[in-house]
Image (cartoon, rainbow, N blue to C red):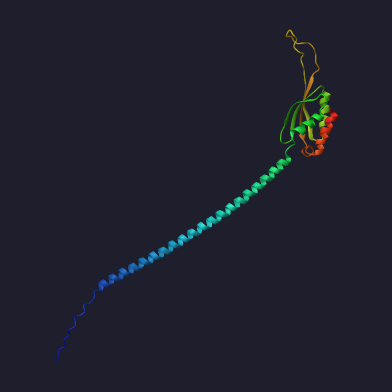
Amino acid sequence: MLVEINLLPKKEAKPIGLLLILSGFFILILLAVMFFYMKGISYTNEIQSLQNEINLTQKSSALEQKKATVIESSSSVEQLKKSIEWAESYPIKTIPLMRKLTALLPERGFIQSFAYDETGTIKISVQFDSESEAAFFLSRLDESKWFDSARMTKLAAQTINGPITTDGSQSNTSYLPRYIGDFDLKVNKVTSKTDKADKETVKEGVEGK
């Protein structure tokens, strides 16, 4: 009978529990790596989305700024246009106007007060020797092309007392009354700005005097 003798060392069986633990640990590490990888991709996408939004906002802001610049430029042009229109419609200078009014006055008519606004409206007070002179002046204003309208709003007589005598008493010397007429006039801006109108003023001033 043969006896089999095995002199090789007997292999010890590896514990299954250790393998399972190592496998589980490896799986956990793998899952963690995948989680952080996916999270990183998500963050990257979110950052890219935010960057796109920032770029879009910047483009929108630039576009709005460009629109605002265009609007501001358009507003400036409109303002300039209004300024030009205002300058064109601005009333004539006072000196030619005063010359015109003086030329239309009767020989002994004197302007006491004068008010003139940029709308072309004039208010004047004039001293006359008689009521007929006031009517004559109003008639000449109506006939003049310089004025669109003219009306006398008031005519009042002013009594002038005699001078004070040496003894301090009032002199009984009588004087003719003076008349103060108030007039409202509307300037014709077109006619009043022409050279013809200026020549008419000079001519009438010479003839009137």
Image vertical order of residue 185 relative to residue 5, above or below: above
Q: Is residue 149 visible?
A: yes
Residue 82 spot, x, y in % from top left: 69, 44
Residue 181 spot, x, y in % from top left: 78, 25
Which residue is drawn at the image coordinates 50% and 58% (left, top)?
A: 53
164 vs 56, nearest the viewer: 164
Q: Is residue 202 left or right of residue 28?
A: right
Image vertical order of residue 157 relative to residue 164, above or below: below
Extreme-right residue of the structure? 207
Which residue is drawn at the image coordinates 30% and 71% (left, top)?
A: 23
Residue 61 spot, x, y in % from top left: 55, 53
Quarter holding residue 118:
top right
Q: Is residue 145 visible?
A: no
Q: How many marks do you count on the picture?
A: 0
Residue 190 spot, x, y in % from top left: 78, 39
Which residue is drawn at the image coordinates 44% and 62% (left, top)?
A: 44
Q: Quadrant of the C terminus?
A: top right
